[in-house]
Image (spheres, helix red, strand yellow):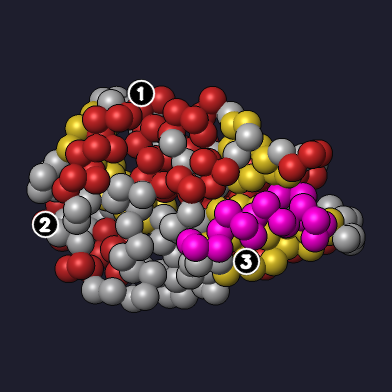
Amino acid sequence: MQRLGVAGWPVAHSRSPAMHNAALAALGLADWHYQLLPLPPDVLEETVRRLPELGFVGINVTIPHKEAALALATSATDAARAIGAANTLTFGAGGTIHADNTDAPGFLAALERSPAGRSTLVLGAGGSARAVVWALLQAGAAEVRVWNRTPGRAAALAAELGARHDAEPQPADLIVNCTSVGLAGERLDALPITDLLGTASTVADLVYREGGTALLAAAAARGCETVDGIEILVRQGALSLAAWTGRDAPLDVMRAAAK
């Protein structure tokens, strides 16, 4: 059995197992299986290093482990190094671990319009935010600003990647939520951007939950184009799956299973 999984804390909400197992079945890879790996931070390193012994080919990594995952790797793509975080680990011979970041290209693939020339605001300062900021800069966004509830973290991320820090969120054409707000059904006022939604033409939310998030509902009500976390999940997951199996991932199958 070839095993795959997603490591996070918490991770019970993840739709990655359903999405990836549906894709593996569609590809005829009956001897492959994808599972949840609920790992608190204090056991992440020890557990990840033992996974190859248990038949794991690779894993996805989600909140809060993306920066720690990169630190575990023996090699990494240029993108993962530049971003400073990894969401995909692949295990090789002799205990080697290769890190990649499919969050960045997956996010860009989920957008209906290119961010080139657009003003952008990224909410959050964790591993996902790092990937989105880097992706927007690489794609030629006219301006990339970062806000976080802990200002120092946002300022440090912005300085490191070449973006700007907003002490208070300012209007932007594209707003991207990379915080965990919405995962547990939090009200929209948990993010200080209600007044900014009318200025944005596109709002993307990396969070996904049954019934959608309050942020995307409010954005749609104001006429914004919306990009939900499921589509971003599918796009980054497809890139990870292709890297592990050497096969093109069936996007429609993954999208249906994730929803």
Residue 199 appears in the picture as rendered:
no
Q: Quadrant of the N terminus?
A: bottom right
Of 58 and 196, the residue lying toward us = 58
In the rendered structure, find residue 37 and report the number of the disc placed on it. 3
Work out how far the residue at label 1 is from the one at label 3, CA to CA, in angstroms.
36 Å
Secondary structure of residue under mark 2: helix
> Would you place residue 141 above or below residue 1 in this image?
above
Q: Residues within 10 Å of mark 1 (few under 14, many from 20)?
A: some
Q: Earlier in the sequence, mark 1 or mark 3?
A: 3
Determine contact: label 2, label 1, CB under 8 Å.
no
> Would you place residue 219 above or below residue 248 in this image?
below
Q: Residues within 10 Å of mark 2 (few under 14, many from 20)?
A: few
Name which residue lies at 41% across and 47% down: 127
Q: Quadrant of the C terminus?
A: bottom right
Left or right relative to 89: residue 121: left
Residue 57 appears in the picture as rendered:
yes
Disc 2 target residue: 195
- How many numbered marks, from 0 up? 3
Give x and y (percent) for residue 238.
65, 47
Secondary structure of residue under mark 3: strand
Disc 1 target residue: 140
What is the span of residues highlighted in magenta in the rendered image?
A: 41-58
**Residue 132, picture quadrant:** top left
Of 142 and 168, the residue lying toward us = 168
Name which residue lies at 35% across and 62% down: 180
